[in-house]
Image (tube, grey):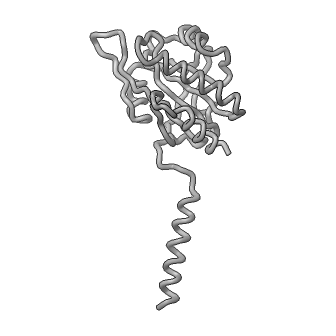
Amino acid sequence: MKTSKMLSVLFIAILLLSACSEPNKSGRKVASFSFTDQNGKPFGTDQLAEKVWIADFIFTNCKTVCTPMTRKMSDLQTTFKEEDVEVEFVTFTVDPDSDTPQVLKEYIGQFSADESNWHLLTGYSQEAIEKIALNQFQTIVQKPDASGQFIHGSNFYIIDQKGYIVNEYSYMQESFEEQILDEVKRLVK
């Protein structure tokens, strides 16, 4: 009896340990996509394969959270470069009808001179971005009929090398930048 109990305990321990060593796949997997970036070039999951990336949702005519969010994304880009950590940045516009590649190019120029790892995306319909936000990132994007402003989430999403969303952070959290830096460093090891 003692031997069978010991084997059972050992078997359970091995299962638990092997489960702990598996990569974190509890997040949602981002479906394959290809859109148009601020340079008018196709950009999507093919270019992001095997890379860690950070995503957010903004629009260039925003009168509230988008400018501070984009400033934070620029700060993150600078921090990761200084720390020599390779990460991609992806910003989805929630106003694809107005935010053309040229508009996005002018917009990013206000925040960063380095576009090598930061892609602002457009080239999809309003309905498509609303579905992507809801189904992939579990956040809301809505275009109210009575306003030129859009309703959208203000989180930053960390996506791992296999395309899984592993975490999300509010840019308004006091230590959000440190948390993102730590999490991305852990992923790129």
The spot of residue 185 in percent (x, y) is 64, 41
- Of all residues, the one furthest to the bottom in this rendering is 1
Picture quadrant of residue 36: top right
Q: Decide which of 173, 169 is in the foreground and name it.
A: 173
Residue at the (52%, 66%) spot, across then down: 16
Residue at the (36%, 28%) spot, across then down: 140
Residue at the (55%, 32%) spot, across then down: 177
The spot of residue 95 in percent (x, y) is 43, 15
Q: Which quadrant, please, contains the C terminus?
A: top right
The spot of residue 98 in percent (x, y) is 45, 9
- In the image, is residue 173 above or below residue 28? above
Residue at the (43%, 34%) spot, across then down: 137
Q: Decide which of 165, 71 is in the foreground and name it.
A: 71
> In the shown orientation, is residue 171 left or right of residue 89?
left
- In the image, is residue 46 above or below residue 43? below
> In the shown orientation, is residue 100 left or right of residue 47?
left
- In the image, is residue 61 above or below residue 41? above
> In the shown orientation, is residue 117 left or right of residue 61?
right
Picture quadrant of residue 101: top right
- Of all residues, the one furthest to the front in this rendering is 174
